[in-house]
Amino acid sequence: MDGITLSGRSILVVEAEPFAALEVEEGLRDAGANVFGVRRLRDALHMAEHPALSAAVIAQRLGRDNTTAVCRRLSDLGIPFMFHTRYDATEARQKWPDAPVVTKPASANELIRAVAELLH
């Protein structure tokens, strides 16, 4: 993990693909984060309200749903987030220029570094 620690941080992971979700969640846990993983849009909107949330890793799509509403809510709450996606992120970059984009597949180290940068 390159010595990066996310100890004491709570990270929301919004990802519909089970394997991708597991990989991201395990990497963040290994770096010391408390991880809240969700697979559905309604659950993501609910968890965005969690008072201990430090940051979020968001897929652009959850099945047929896009995650724009979740990103809007996180932005309104001042919670930093990043995208972890295999899709063209041009629109996401235009809407949220401060949100980093990490392209799938990405290593655990790459994701952890991106989350750590969000938090500093």
Image (tube, rainbow, N blue to C red):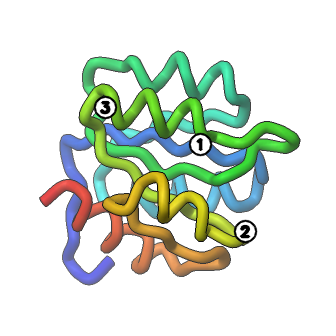
Which residue carries the number 3 mark? 53
Placement of 49 over or under 55, stated as above or below: above
Q: Residue at x 46, y 34 (%)?
A: 72
Disc 1 is placed on an element classified as: strand
Q: Quadrant of residue 50?
A: top left
Disc 2 is placed on an element classified as: loop
Q: What's under tag 1, amino acid-wise?
A: Val
Q: What's under tag 2, amino acid-wise?
A: Tyr
- The earlier-in-sequence mark between 1 and 3 is 1
Q: Nearer the viewer, residue 10 or 59?
A: 59
Q: What's under tag 3, amino acid-wise?
A: Leu
Q: Residue at x 58, y 28 (%)?
A: 44
The percent coordinates of residue 43 (x first, y second) are: 63, 22
Q: CA distance from mark 1 to mark 2?
A: 15 Å
- The earlier-in-sequence mark between 3 and 2 is 3
Callout 3 touching callout 2 (CB < 8 Å): no
Which residue carries the number 2 mark? 87
The percent coordinates of residue 52 (x first, y second) are: 26, 25
Q: Residues within 10 Å of mark 2 (few under 14, many from 20)?
A: few
Callout 1 touching callout 3 (CB < 8 Å): no
Which residue carries the number 1 mark? 14
Q: Residue at x 67, y 20 (%)?
A: 42
